[in-house]
Amino acid sequence: MLLYRFSLLSVCLLLIAACGRSRPNLPGLDSATWRQDPYGCRNVRASQAKAFLKAKEQLYGSTTATIEELLGRPDEEELAEQTEKTYYYYLVPGPQCSPNHQRSAVNRLSIHFGAIGTVTEVLTTQPL
């Protein structure tokens, strides 16, 4: 009986692991270059964001870990109710480039995660 339960548990864990999503392929996005431009201060992200937005449908359902693997830690993060959150990545230089990284109204990429921690919305503040 104990062996049966252990086998059943092992099969369930394998099935759960097999359901994981692979990293989306986003042609034109150079993750390393994106990560080397924190707060968009080097003005490299805007051109990369166009490629990112063309393939944004591939991101829906991705986890925070997948997005952080692609884009690095967000420049800003906003927590909402029910474990929802939004990651912000600045696309162009602005006041956020000052030493205290104050919030800025310049164009930025917003990635919203729903209550289960997956991407539900990808937007920019202004069109590219």
Image (tube, grey):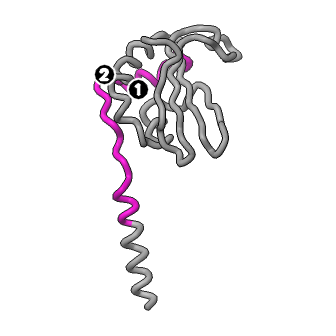
Q: Residue at x 34, y 35 (%)?
A: 58
Within the image, what quadrant is residue 11 found in? bottom left
Question: Label 1: few (<14), some or many (≥20) within 10 Å?
Answer: few
Q: Is residue 101 above or below residue 120?
A: above
Label 2: which secondary element = loop
**Quadrant, the C terminus:** top left
Residue occupied by mark 2: 28
Residues 121 and 1: in front is: 121
> What x and y, as percent, mark residue 81?
67, 41
Within the image, what quadrant is residue 48 found in? top left
Q: Residue at x 48, y 23 (%)?
A: 123
Residues 33 and 121: in front is: 121
> What x and y, as percent, mark residue 18?
34, 58
Q: Is residue 41 above or below residue 11?
A: above
Residues 53 and 68: in front is: 53
Residue occupied by mark 1: 32
